[in-house]
Image (cartoon, rainbow, N blue to C red):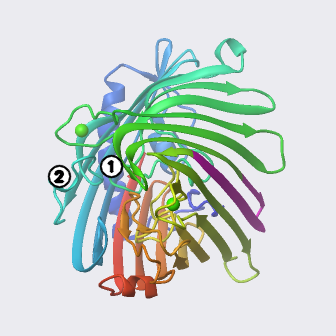
């Protein structure tokens, strides 16, 4: 668990200078826009913490607005990011290719609660991409970087109805669990990878909580409004957390039915009937150590083939006695690969619906949790209470030499079916710095470089790939 850097600064040290003045001007403009919406309803607001210093007090007027029996809260984020990539692009590793991206994303949210019980949540998202060589036609299914103003979430939630443990959450919604390795929204991507049209039944009992849901994930296209969920594809999930333990313990079952008949198996084409069963557990001691394990087993049918695949992650970190209390961490991630491309057994792990952004498998997003072994070392240092610099080293290998190197979209990118090119994918070094100003403006910048290994050099063009980014995100 990374240390929380979103704490409010202790004093006014970060407000000085022209940058601080610009920040105050920006927040004043945004605040006026949002506040105008709220006050136009003749609202009676909760004023208890309006006079507190800092951002929370500043935004308080729109965080709890009373309208008769309703209470309304507004939130959102404006995010800008510049990226420059060399020898790879959004589509993956590509020696000789380069791209630039200027990404803008605005999310605006409103939550309306009736008598502290049912809650309606609406989120608009407006995402644009500039400078890039890619356009909408390069992403016929779903565009990861651009989707003009659309409804990303619209759901009704009612938890613990009538003081029973039972509740529900129905509609378009973002779903994530645990450390987001198995179910993650992928919010680093400009349109966000996973939002769902889902019907969820929720239990919140003394000893455990449980979500049972059925859903379809969204496709993002600017030409379509509102966005549609994927057709001929259905996922059924039960996800359970056990309470009152000294560590977190979560158990899950995922049943996926893909009837699009687009799957090419080892012994013919067909559909997917996949089942994943897994467990995730994490524990930590305050400012001392943290650890976690995840294990997933997959079985079912992949076209005419039998699925037999596994995924696992183990991670451990400790804070060391040095100035700034740096954290050292190690991780190992395993996604099984297929040992024989013609035996009718599908052994390639598919990553479930997990995160595949910069938190996982390197910042450059050249790898995914499929036919992969990722040996990871990480170091985090805090030069200031609100700033963190993170370094990562990854050594990547294939799990099985005759299976492919997969992209984050689970597309086979390079493959030596004979298995003569070895296992070594290469090494990646990543660095990023994050600075949180006044609790709501987050500045981030980073660099990553990939050094290809022998599998890469023996299966095609092979050069170093590198990436730089700078991002500013203002949340309210
Ligand atoms: Ca759309
Ligand atoms: Ca096989």
Q: Main secondary structure of the magenta part?
A: strand
Which span of residues is magenta-colored?
A: 281-299
Residue 287 figure quarter: bottom right
CB at disc 1 and ligand 1 closer than 8 Å: no
The residue closer to the viewer here, 266 or 262, is: 266
* Secondary element type, mark 2: helix
Q: Residue at x 70, y 76 (%)?
A: 325
Q: Residue at x 62, y 57 (%)?
A: 310
Location of the C terminus (image quadrant): top left
Q: Which circle marks residue 136 in the picture?
A: 2
Q: Which circle marks residue 191 in the picture?
A: 1
Estimate the x, y position of residue 222 in percent, counting from the top left.
20, 42
Left or right position of 205 against 43: right
The residue closer to the viewer here, 338 or 250, is: 338
Residue 412: tell me if it is visible.
yes
* Secondary element type, mark 1: loop
Estimate the x, y position of residue 148 in percent, counting from the top left.
21, 43
Left or right position of 382 against 408: right
């Amino acid at each position: 668990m990374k240390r929380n850097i979103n704490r409010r600064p202790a004093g006014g040290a970060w407000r000085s200078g022209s940058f601080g003045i610009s920040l105050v001007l920006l927040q004043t403009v945004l605040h006026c826009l949002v506040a105008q919406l709220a006050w136009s309803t003749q609202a009676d607001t909760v004023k208890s913490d309006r006079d507190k210093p800092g951002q929370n007090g500043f935004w308080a007027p729109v965080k709890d607005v009373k309208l008769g029996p309703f209470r309304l809260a507004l939130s959102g984020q404006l995010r800008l990011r510049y990226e420059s990539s060399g020898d790879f692009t959004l589509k993956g590793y590509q020696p000789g290719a380069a791209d630039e991206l200027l990404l803008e994303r605005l999310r605006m949210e409103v939550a309306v609660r009736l008598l502290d019980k049912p809650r309606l949540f609406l989120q608009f998202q407006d995402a644009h991409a500039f400078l890039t060589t890619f356009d909408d036609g390069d992403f016929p299914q779903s565009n990861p970087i651009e989707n003009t103003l659309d409804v990303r979430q619209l759901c009704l939630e009612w938890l613990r109805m009538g003081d029973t443990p039972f509740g529900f959450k129905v509609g378009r919604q973002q779903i994530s669990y645990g450390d987001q390795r198995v179910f993650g929204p992928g919010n680093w991507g400009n349109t966000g990878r996973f939002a769902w049209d889902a019907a969820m039944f929720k239990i919140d009992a003394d000893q455990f909580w449980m979500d049972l849901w059925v859903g379809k994930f969204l496709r993002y296209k600017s030409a379509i409004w509102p966005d549609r969920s994927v057709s001929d594809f259905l996922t059924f999930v039960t996800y359970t957390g056990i309470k009152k333990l000294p560590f977190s313990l979560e158990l899950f079952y995922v049943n996926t039915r893909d009837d699009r008949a687009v799957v090419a198996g080892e012994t013919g084409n067909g559909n997917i009937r996949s089942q994943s069963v897994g467990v995730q557990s994490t524990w930590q001691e305050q400012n001392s150590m943290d650890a976690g394990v995840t294990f997933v087993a997959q079985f079912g049918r992949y076209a005419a083939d039998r699925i037999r695949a596994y995924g696992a992650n183990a991670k451990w970190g400790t804070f060391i006695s040095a100035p700034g209390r740096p954290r050292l961490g190690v991780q190992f991630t395993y996604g099984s690969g297929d040992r024989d491309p013609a035996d009718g057994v599908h052994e390639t792990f598919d990553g479930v619906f997990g995160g595949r952004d910069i938190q996982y498998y390197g910042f450059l997003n050249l790898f995914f949790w499929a036919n992969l072994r990722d040996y990871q070392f990480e170091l985090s240092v805090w030069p200031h209470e609100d700033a963190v610099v993170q370094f990562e080293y990854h050594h990547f290998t294939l799990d099985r030499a005759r299976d492919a190197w997969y992209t984050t979209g689970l597309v086979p990118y390079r493959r030596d079916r004979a298995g003569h090119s070895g296992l070594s994918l290469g090494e990646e070094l990543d660095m990023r710095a994050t600075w949180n100003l006044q609790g709501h403006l987050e500045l981030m910048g980073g660099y990553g470089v990939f050094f290809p290994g022998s599998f890469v050099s023996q299966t095609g063009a092979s050069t170093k790939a590198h990436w730089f980014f700078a991002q500013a995100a203002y949340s309210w």
